[in-house]
Amino acid sequence: MIWQLDLILLIFLVITALISLRVRDLLGASMVFGIYSFLICLLWAGMGAVDVAFTEAAVGAGVSTVILVATVYHTRRVTGGHKRASGMKVLSLLLMLVLGGVLLHASGDFPALGDPTSPANDHPVAQYYIEGSYQDTKVPNLVTSVLADYRGYDTLFETVVVFVAGIGILAVIGVPTARMRREEVCGDTAQFGEDSDLIILQTCRLVVPVLQLFALYVIAHGHHSPGGGFQGGVLFGASYILLALSGGLREALRRLSESMSFRLAACGIVIYAGFGLLCMALGSSFLDYAILDSILPGGVAMARSHSMLIVEAGVGFTVTTILFVIYANLATRGKLEGGL
Amino acid sequence: MNGFILGVALFMLLLVGALLYRVCVGPTAIDRIVAVNAIGTKTTVLLVLIGLLFDDVGMFVDFAVAYGLLNFMGSLAAARYFQRSERRAEADLRHPLPIQSNGGDA
Amino acid sequence: MSLFFDILAGSLMAAGLIFFVGTVTGMLRFPDFYTRMHAGGKGDTLSTILILLGAAVHVSEDFFHDPIHQWGVLLVMVKILGIAAFLMLTSPTSTHALMRAGFEDAHETDETVVDKDQDGPSLEELQSRTWEERS
């Protein structure tokens, strides 16, 4: 841990938070949140937590900024005039000061950063993961093996939560009649919208295939390098959002329509849960991959490694399509045409 | 050499701090967006440099590739925002709509 | 041999840093959005590419010492060069996109700074001349 880097990054973090309060223009403020994400991601990379930093970069600095800009497009760009401090503002300021003071006081009791004898590092479960993970699953990346194998149950429900978020967006702002109209119109002529810029279009045509291949690489190589299903899925979804930003949403919908998105998202969850049920059908408990040794080649450890890959692919499907659906609905206010 | 790379990384971080001034005081929104774009590019470089300092570049380089690809998207979204709001203002001028409760934006 | 690689990598990174200092100075001191964009878009791209090339040279030093066993390092070097090539493609594109957006945002206001000769014609005179008179 390089303390000089961490110190400067933390100071910049505080400065950025203050800037985001000062900037009245909401578009500028959403860009400032982008900077906040970069700095947090650098802090985590400086601590050596590369998987977390990867996810933060992909979601926070890429997709989240785009979604914020799309929201600002449909609402106002300037915050309302600041009136004098009302009672509620004073009350919330007091509450924040009290809470912040309590948290600061409690942080004095934390163990030092990187302390090997802290309870999180010293617990027998942590020791078991660190020592036994490679023999059990033949996967060098500890984060992936804990996420997809030892705690696979949690990851299944995280994927379901992502799916429910997509359904929720559809339920809240989706407009049914416009959708049905768009389903008839979309899929005929292959012309790009008249407002797409030629340079951006051609550059994105070069970038999108590279991005998609790289996303598939991140999903597949998540066993050996930082990555995995979620990060690769976000990159893949970002490639469709890039198509929508450069050529128009109609182009992106032509390649991945909304109904297909939901079917693929459901497929992802079915793959994951289906694997768990397959394990139950073969006689063991839910999501216990060791029993799949009879179907998959290579021995018990390799069976776990292979099933982790398949399960991560399921997570990737869901995350990709739901991210695209969220962007498509937010950018057009549910109507899937016009808008950002 | 490690000390030199640390010096380069710290100096670059200080210059990024100078760019934060442009984010804070940019009279227009576009100034802020340009500064954020520049900071994003430098973050990619900083990730590779942190990898060099930890002596394990292979771990950080995948991440830097993904970051470089995604930084591009934020600027494009902001540029498209301005382009579309210009079109919407023009369309409103040509076909002014009566005031509706649902909003008449297309 | 190792000294040669170190000097090469160090000089590439130092050059990139010098260009970045120029970029930041430009972005802070120029009077107008268009000029600031000019400084930011160009200098940023070049300095990033130079620093990444320096990093790639530094990484490849391991490979050249022991080509048989350390061939995995070649993959990392190719990836770093890939980032540099990718940035060379997309950074000017985002500069172009932002310049267009800024043009559409500001073209009705008088926020730009126009260079004027000391003894030359003023802006109104220039704008009122016809095409034949100007050439």
Image (cartoon, coloured by chain):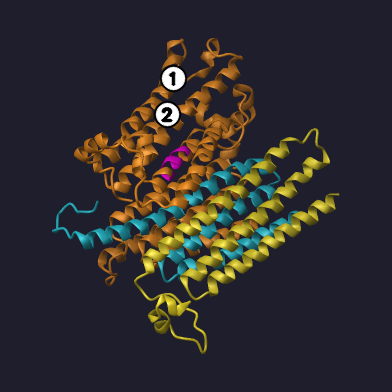
Chain colours: A orange, B cyan, C yellow
**Residue situated in front as seen by the camera: A173 or A192:** A192
Q: Residue A22: horizontal and vertical position, in percent?
A: 40, 68
Residue A155 visible in the snapshot: no
Residue C110 horizontal side relative to residue A313, left or right = left
Above or below, comparing residue A67 to residue C71 in the picture: below
Q: Are marks 2 and 1 in contact (CB under 8 Å)?
A: yes
Q: Quadrant of residue A132?
A: top right
State the predominant SS element of the stretch in magenta.
helix
The percent coordinates of residue A48 (x first, y second) are 61, 45
Q: Which residue is mark 2?
A: A156
The residue pinned by badge 1 equals A276
Badge 2, how many Cα within 10 Å: few under 14, some, many 20+? many
Residue pictured at 34% horizontal, 34% vertical = A257
Q: Is residue A5 visible?
A: yes
Q: Residue at x 52, y 52 (%)?
A: A40
Q: Which structural element holds mark 1?
A: helix
Q: Position of residue A333 (x, y in %)?
A: 27, 47
Of residues A35 and A205, the one drawn nearer to the viewer in this rendering:
A205
Q: Amino acid at mark 1?
A: Gly
Exactly how many numbered labels are in the figure? 2
Who's the residue at 38% across and 28% down the image?
A264
Q: Earlier in the sequence, mark 2 or mark 1?
A: 2
Q: Is residue A331 left or right of residue A55?
A: left
